[in-house]
Image (tube, grey):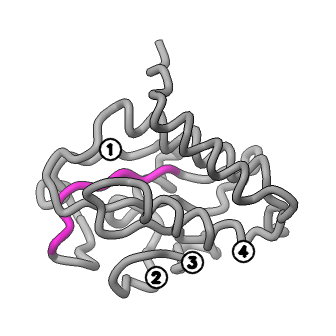
């Protein structure tokens, strides 16, 4: 059974819809989406996007400290999300095999792969300095946020 969307995430998705109203540009929308997440989500230190290019993820719009610019598919939490096609909810990144530490302060992470049908576009990645910051309700809300973004944006060409 799917986790119901909390009022916080319903509001966050509504804010995203309003923010993106009348703008369909993928780059502009991912930039504003990362800023909204960074502003509204408590206890996070990074929120942003990596876009898939061949066999690696490349850094896209984000909020937070400078980040790794390239992540191979299958490596780290982001690369694992792409390789498996499944969201990753990691309570303690230091216990995650092959974790890539872009910011040593990060302790937990949630990553949602972004799909256009069968084609993976990249991932939405959010980090926190607190162990176990994210739970199933956060995952459901962040997945809904990602779906809202995808529905309101013109996706990049293949």
Residue 136: percent from left, percent from top: 34, 31
Q: Is residue 99 magenta?
A: no
Magenta stretch mostly in which secondary structure? Answer: strand
Disc sitting over residue 36 in the figure: none
Residue hosting label 2: 70
Disc sitting over residue 89 in the figure: 1
Classify mark 1: residues with Cα within 10 Å, few (<14), some (14-19) or many (20+): many
- Marks 2 and 1: which is nearer the front? 1
Dot placed on the residue nearer the N-terminal end, 2 or 1: 2
Residue at 23%, 78% in the rendered image: 103
Compared across the picture, whether 138 is left or right of 60 comes to left
Residue at 37%, 83% in the rendered image: 67
Dot 3: element: strand
Residue hosting label 3: 60
Dot 2: element: strand
Q: State the separation of the CA atoms marked 4 and 3.
A: 11 Å
Residue 20: percent from left, percent from top: 75, 59
Q: State the separation of the CA atoms marked 2 and 4.
A: 21 Å
Dot placed on the residue nearer the N-terminal end, 4 or 1: 4
Q: Which residues are magenta?
A: 105-112
């Amino acid at each position: 059974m799917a986790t119901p969307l909390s009022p916080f995430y319903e509001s966050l998705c509504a804010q995203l819809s309003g923010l993106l109203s009348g703008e369909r540009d993928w780059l502009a929308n991912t930039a504003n989406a990362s800023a909204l997440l960074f502003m509204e989500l408590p206890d996070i230190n990074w929120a942003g996007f990596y876009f898939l290019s061949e066999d690696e993820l490349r850094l896209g719009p984000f909020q937070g400290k400078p980040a790794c610019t390239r992540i191979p598919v299958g490596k780290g939490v982001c690369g694992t999300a792409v390789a498996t096609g499944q969201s990753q909810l990691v309570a303690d990144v230091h216990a995650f095999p092959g974790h890539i530490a872009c910011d040593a302060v990060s302790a937990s992470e949630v990553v949602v792969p972004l799909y256009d049908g069968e084609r993976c576009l990249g991932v939405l990645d959010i980090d926190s300095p607190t162990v176990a910051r994210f739970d199933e309700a956060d995952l459901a809300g962040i997945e809904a946020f990602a779906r809202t973004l995808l529905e309101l944006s013109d996706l990049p060409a293949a």
